[in-house]
Amino acid sequence: MLKSLLNFFISDDNSNNSFYQVYQKLVKWKEGNVYPNSYDLPETISLPYDFWEKVKGLYRNTRNDKLERSVSVYWVDGDLILSSITTGSTSFVRSNSQIKVSYIPKNNEYFYKEIILDGKRYSRREVYFKKVPKQIDLHYLFNMHTHPPHLHNETTYYGFFSAQDIKSMISSGAIVTGLITDHFYLLFRTNKVDASVANLQDADLSSETITERYNYVLYKGALGKKLHRVLSHL
């Protein structure tokens, strides 16, 4: 699991649009308690194979049973933790993973760093005593969730981000959130987001309005392919 997480964030792609480089900026923005300028984000984003396999699995399961699913990503003292999959109703899902990190003495020089996720051991490794932090750094990075397909006049379609999705993103303070349908979306909040977004309705939302009216940066791509910025203005 941990190897898959690291592969998720550290792609073999060394180009200037690998997600690892976006992630490095994301950490700095979170540490500075700021949202990015739109020009700080690239035109395209590449994601690694292991990540796409997880996304495709979430997509297939949601397509089959029509239930939304959610996965959250956390930062825990230098480790990236992927939450358990949470399954919701046909129209709503909430992720509420519980994470605990402990440093357990092994001997005079080493501790065991143990991470517990939802009551089960997620990982355990040795840490040199000088590397044990005085204060545990545990914070939420972002959430990604699925939307099930809908059928209208024998045509299958998927919904876009809902007003509730955006409001949840605002209330959490997240910089980025993801949506899985038959495509994959990443939505970044910028420092120019219009305050009126808190009052929007589902009917107000489209790729055009979220980027042009509300000043978010949106990426879209086929599952397993490179993400391209939608209506970008660098």
Image (spheres, helix red, strand yellow):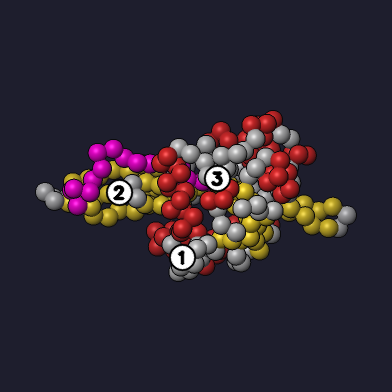
Residue range corresponding to the magenta coloring: 128-144
Secondary structure, mark 1, is loop
**Residue at the right extreme of this rendering:** 153
Question: Which mark is drawn over residue 101?
Answer: none
Secondary structure, mark 3, is loop
- Residue beneath the point at 30% across and 48% down: 114
Check the picture and name the quadrant holding the N terminus: bottom left
- In the rendered structure, are the residues bearing label 3 and label 2 in contact, judged by CB atoms less than 8 Å apart? no
Going by the image, does 33 lie left or right of 177?
left
Question: Which mark is drawn over residue 11?
Answer: 1
Going by the image, does 58 lie left or right of 134?
right
Q: Position of residue 199 (x, y in %)?
A: 69, 30
Residue type, mark 1 in image: Ser
Q: Position of residue 216 (x, y in %)?
A: 63, 44
Residue position for label 2: 114
Residue type, mark 2 in image: Glu
Asked if 134 appears above or below 158 in the picture, the reply is: above
Residue position for label 3: 37
- Residue 7: image quadrant is bottom left
Pair 1/2: label in front: 1
Going by the image, does 192 lie left or right of 111?
right
